[in-house]
Image (cartoon, rainbow, N blue to C red):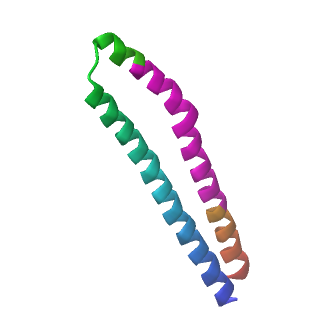
């Protein structure tokens, strides 16, 4: 029984680390895109258009990625908690 609990805790830790890495990758992608926009340095109208486009794409792509990452993390933590309560 202790071995099952240990495996569940290890699985929870691994998924938590994966969620942290996924969040870091999404943030790095956003930072890279912002740096690219700063290097282009166009007119204020172009910057406004890029800003509006970024807001739309960020909501469609980045928020969905982060939502799925944390849904999976939440489910794994829930299953690990139930498993520990049942087997522990």
Q: Is residue 65 magenta?
A: yes
In front of the other: 78 or 30: 30
- In the orientation shown, which residue stands out farthest toward the right? 86
Q: Is residue 69 left or right of residue 4?
A: left
How far across and down, in percent of the image, does residue 65 sit? 57, 44
Q: Quadrant of the C terminus?
A: bottom right
Among all residues in the image, which is located at the extreme top? 45
Reply above or below: 73 against 45. Answer: below
What is the number of callouts on the image? 0
Whether residue 36 is situated above or below residue 86 in the rendered picture = above
Residue at left offset 70%, top offset 89%: 1
Residue sitting at the far bottom: 2
**Residue 12: x %, y % from top left:** 58, 69
User: Picture coordinates of residue 43 (x, y %)?
Assistant: 28, 13
Residue closest to the eye, 77 or 49:
49
> Along the horizontal axis of the image, is 37 left or right of 79?
left
- Residue segment shown in magenta: 50-75
For residue 31, which quarter of the picture?
top left
Is 85 above or below relative to 33?
Answer: below
Prevailing SS of the magenta stretch: helix
Q: Residue at x 70, y 74 (%)?
A: 83
Residue at image position (57%, 32%) is 60
The residue lying at 50 percent from left, 32 percent from top is 58
Position of residue 79 measured from the top left corner of the image (x, y, whole percent): 69, 66
Where residue 46 sits, quadrant-wise, is: top left
């Amino acid at each position: 029984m202790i071995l099952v609990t240990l495996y569940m805790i290890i699985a929870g830790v691994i998924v938590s680390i994966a969620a942290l890495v996924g969040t870091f990758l999404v943030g790095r992608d956003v930072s890279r895109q912002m740096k690219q926009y700063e290097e282009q340095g166009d007119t204020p109208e172009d910057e406004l258009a890029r800003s509006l486009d970024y807001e739309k794409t960020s909501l469609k792509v980045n928020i969905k990625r982060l939502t799925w990452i944390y849904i999976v993390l939440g489910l794994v933590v829930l299953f690990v908690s139930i498993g520990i309560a049942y087997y522990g």
